[in-house]
Amino acid sequence: MNILKFLPIDKDGKISFLGFNFYTDDLLILAILYFLYSQNVKDKFLYIALILLLINK
Amino acid sequence: MNDNDLNEMIKKAQSMIQNNQIPDDIKSLINNLQNSNNNTSSNVNNTYRNNSYNYSSSNNQKNNSNYNYSNKYNSNNNSSNSTYSNNTNFNNGNYNNTEKKYNNSNYQNSSQVSNNNEKSDLNSITSNIDMETLMKIQNIMSKMKNSDNDDMSKLLLSLKPYLRDGRKEKIDEYIQLIKMGKMTQFLDLFGGDKK
């Protein structure tokens, strides 16, 4: 199964999803944040670092 | 060397001083000593008093010569006070030509010597540090060293190759920033009332 069929990624690596434009590393950071939250990780500094990375362009 | 030779030499030296026949080498040595004393006293904020230096001569009177030298050296320390006084009086024979009074008195030096000050400062600093504070500092230093290999920095560094170039540069900055943030947790150990 090719995931690219479900995610419209253009040549620059952008993904338009739900009206937002994401890069692949944005999705990776969001996935890590969700995983950490689901595993009840309490390291707030790690969350801060990942959110800062997500905000930073 | 006999005592007579010493007496003769002393008499010769006195006669040279009385006749103002001091060699240039000795004058330069005396000037150097005075300059060095002035320099050291100015460096350590001394009150260096050498106020009365009276030198008078008359050719008609024949009297004794008095050479009074008083040196008072007071050193003030936090721990100890020492007073060094040296009073020497030379009263020798009758001289027929001149009367010269050389008074170098009231030479007072109340100083704090720099080496003693440094030692007293070190003693005061080390006396204020107790073992409990040293142990806290040691704990913080060990945690700082261990923070290089913690899980957070490992995760962020492993994520680094999958990020864009702009974010790769920021990863190291964020790791340092978060280490500093964690350090504030350790610094709370130093004190302060917690509500």
Image (cartoon, helix red, strand yellow):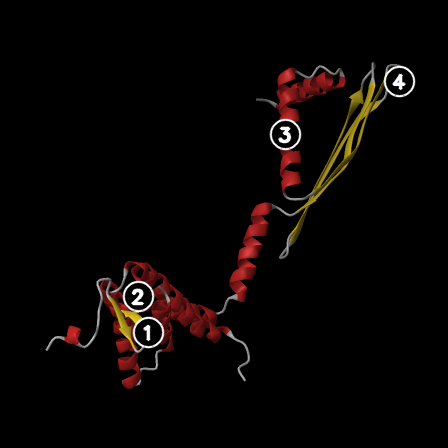
On the rendered structure, is A26 left or right of B45? Answer: left
Which residue bears the numbered disc 2? B148
Quadrant hosting residue B12: top right
Which residue bears the numbered disc 4? B61
Q: CB of mark 4 within 8 Å of CB of mark 2?
A: no
Does residue B12 lie above or below A31 as drawn? Answer: above
Residue found at the very far right of the displayed protein: B60
x and y, in percent, of residue B28 in the image: 63, 21
x and y, in percent, of residue B172 in the image: 33, 61
Answer with mark 4 or mark 3, whichever residue precedes in sequence: 3
Does residue B82 lie above or below B57 as drawn? Answer: below
Disc number lying in front (4 or 2): 2
Q: Amino acid at mark 4?
A: Gln
Q: CA distance from mark 1 to mark 3?
A: 85 Å
Callout 3 secondary element: helix
Q: Amino acid at mark 3?
A: Leu
Q: Nearer the viewer, residue B106 or B38?
A: B38
x and y, in percent, of residue B35 in the image: 65, 30
Quadrant hosting residue B109: top right
Q: CA distance from mark 4 to mark 3?
A: 33 Å
The residue under the point 81% across, 17% down is B95
Q: Is residue B104 visible?
A: yes
Q: Which of the chains bears the disc numbered 4? A: B
Disc number lying in front (2 or 3): 2
Callout 1 secondary element: strand
Q: CA distance from mark 4 to mark 2?
A: 90 Å
x and y, in percent, of residue B147 in the image: 32, 68
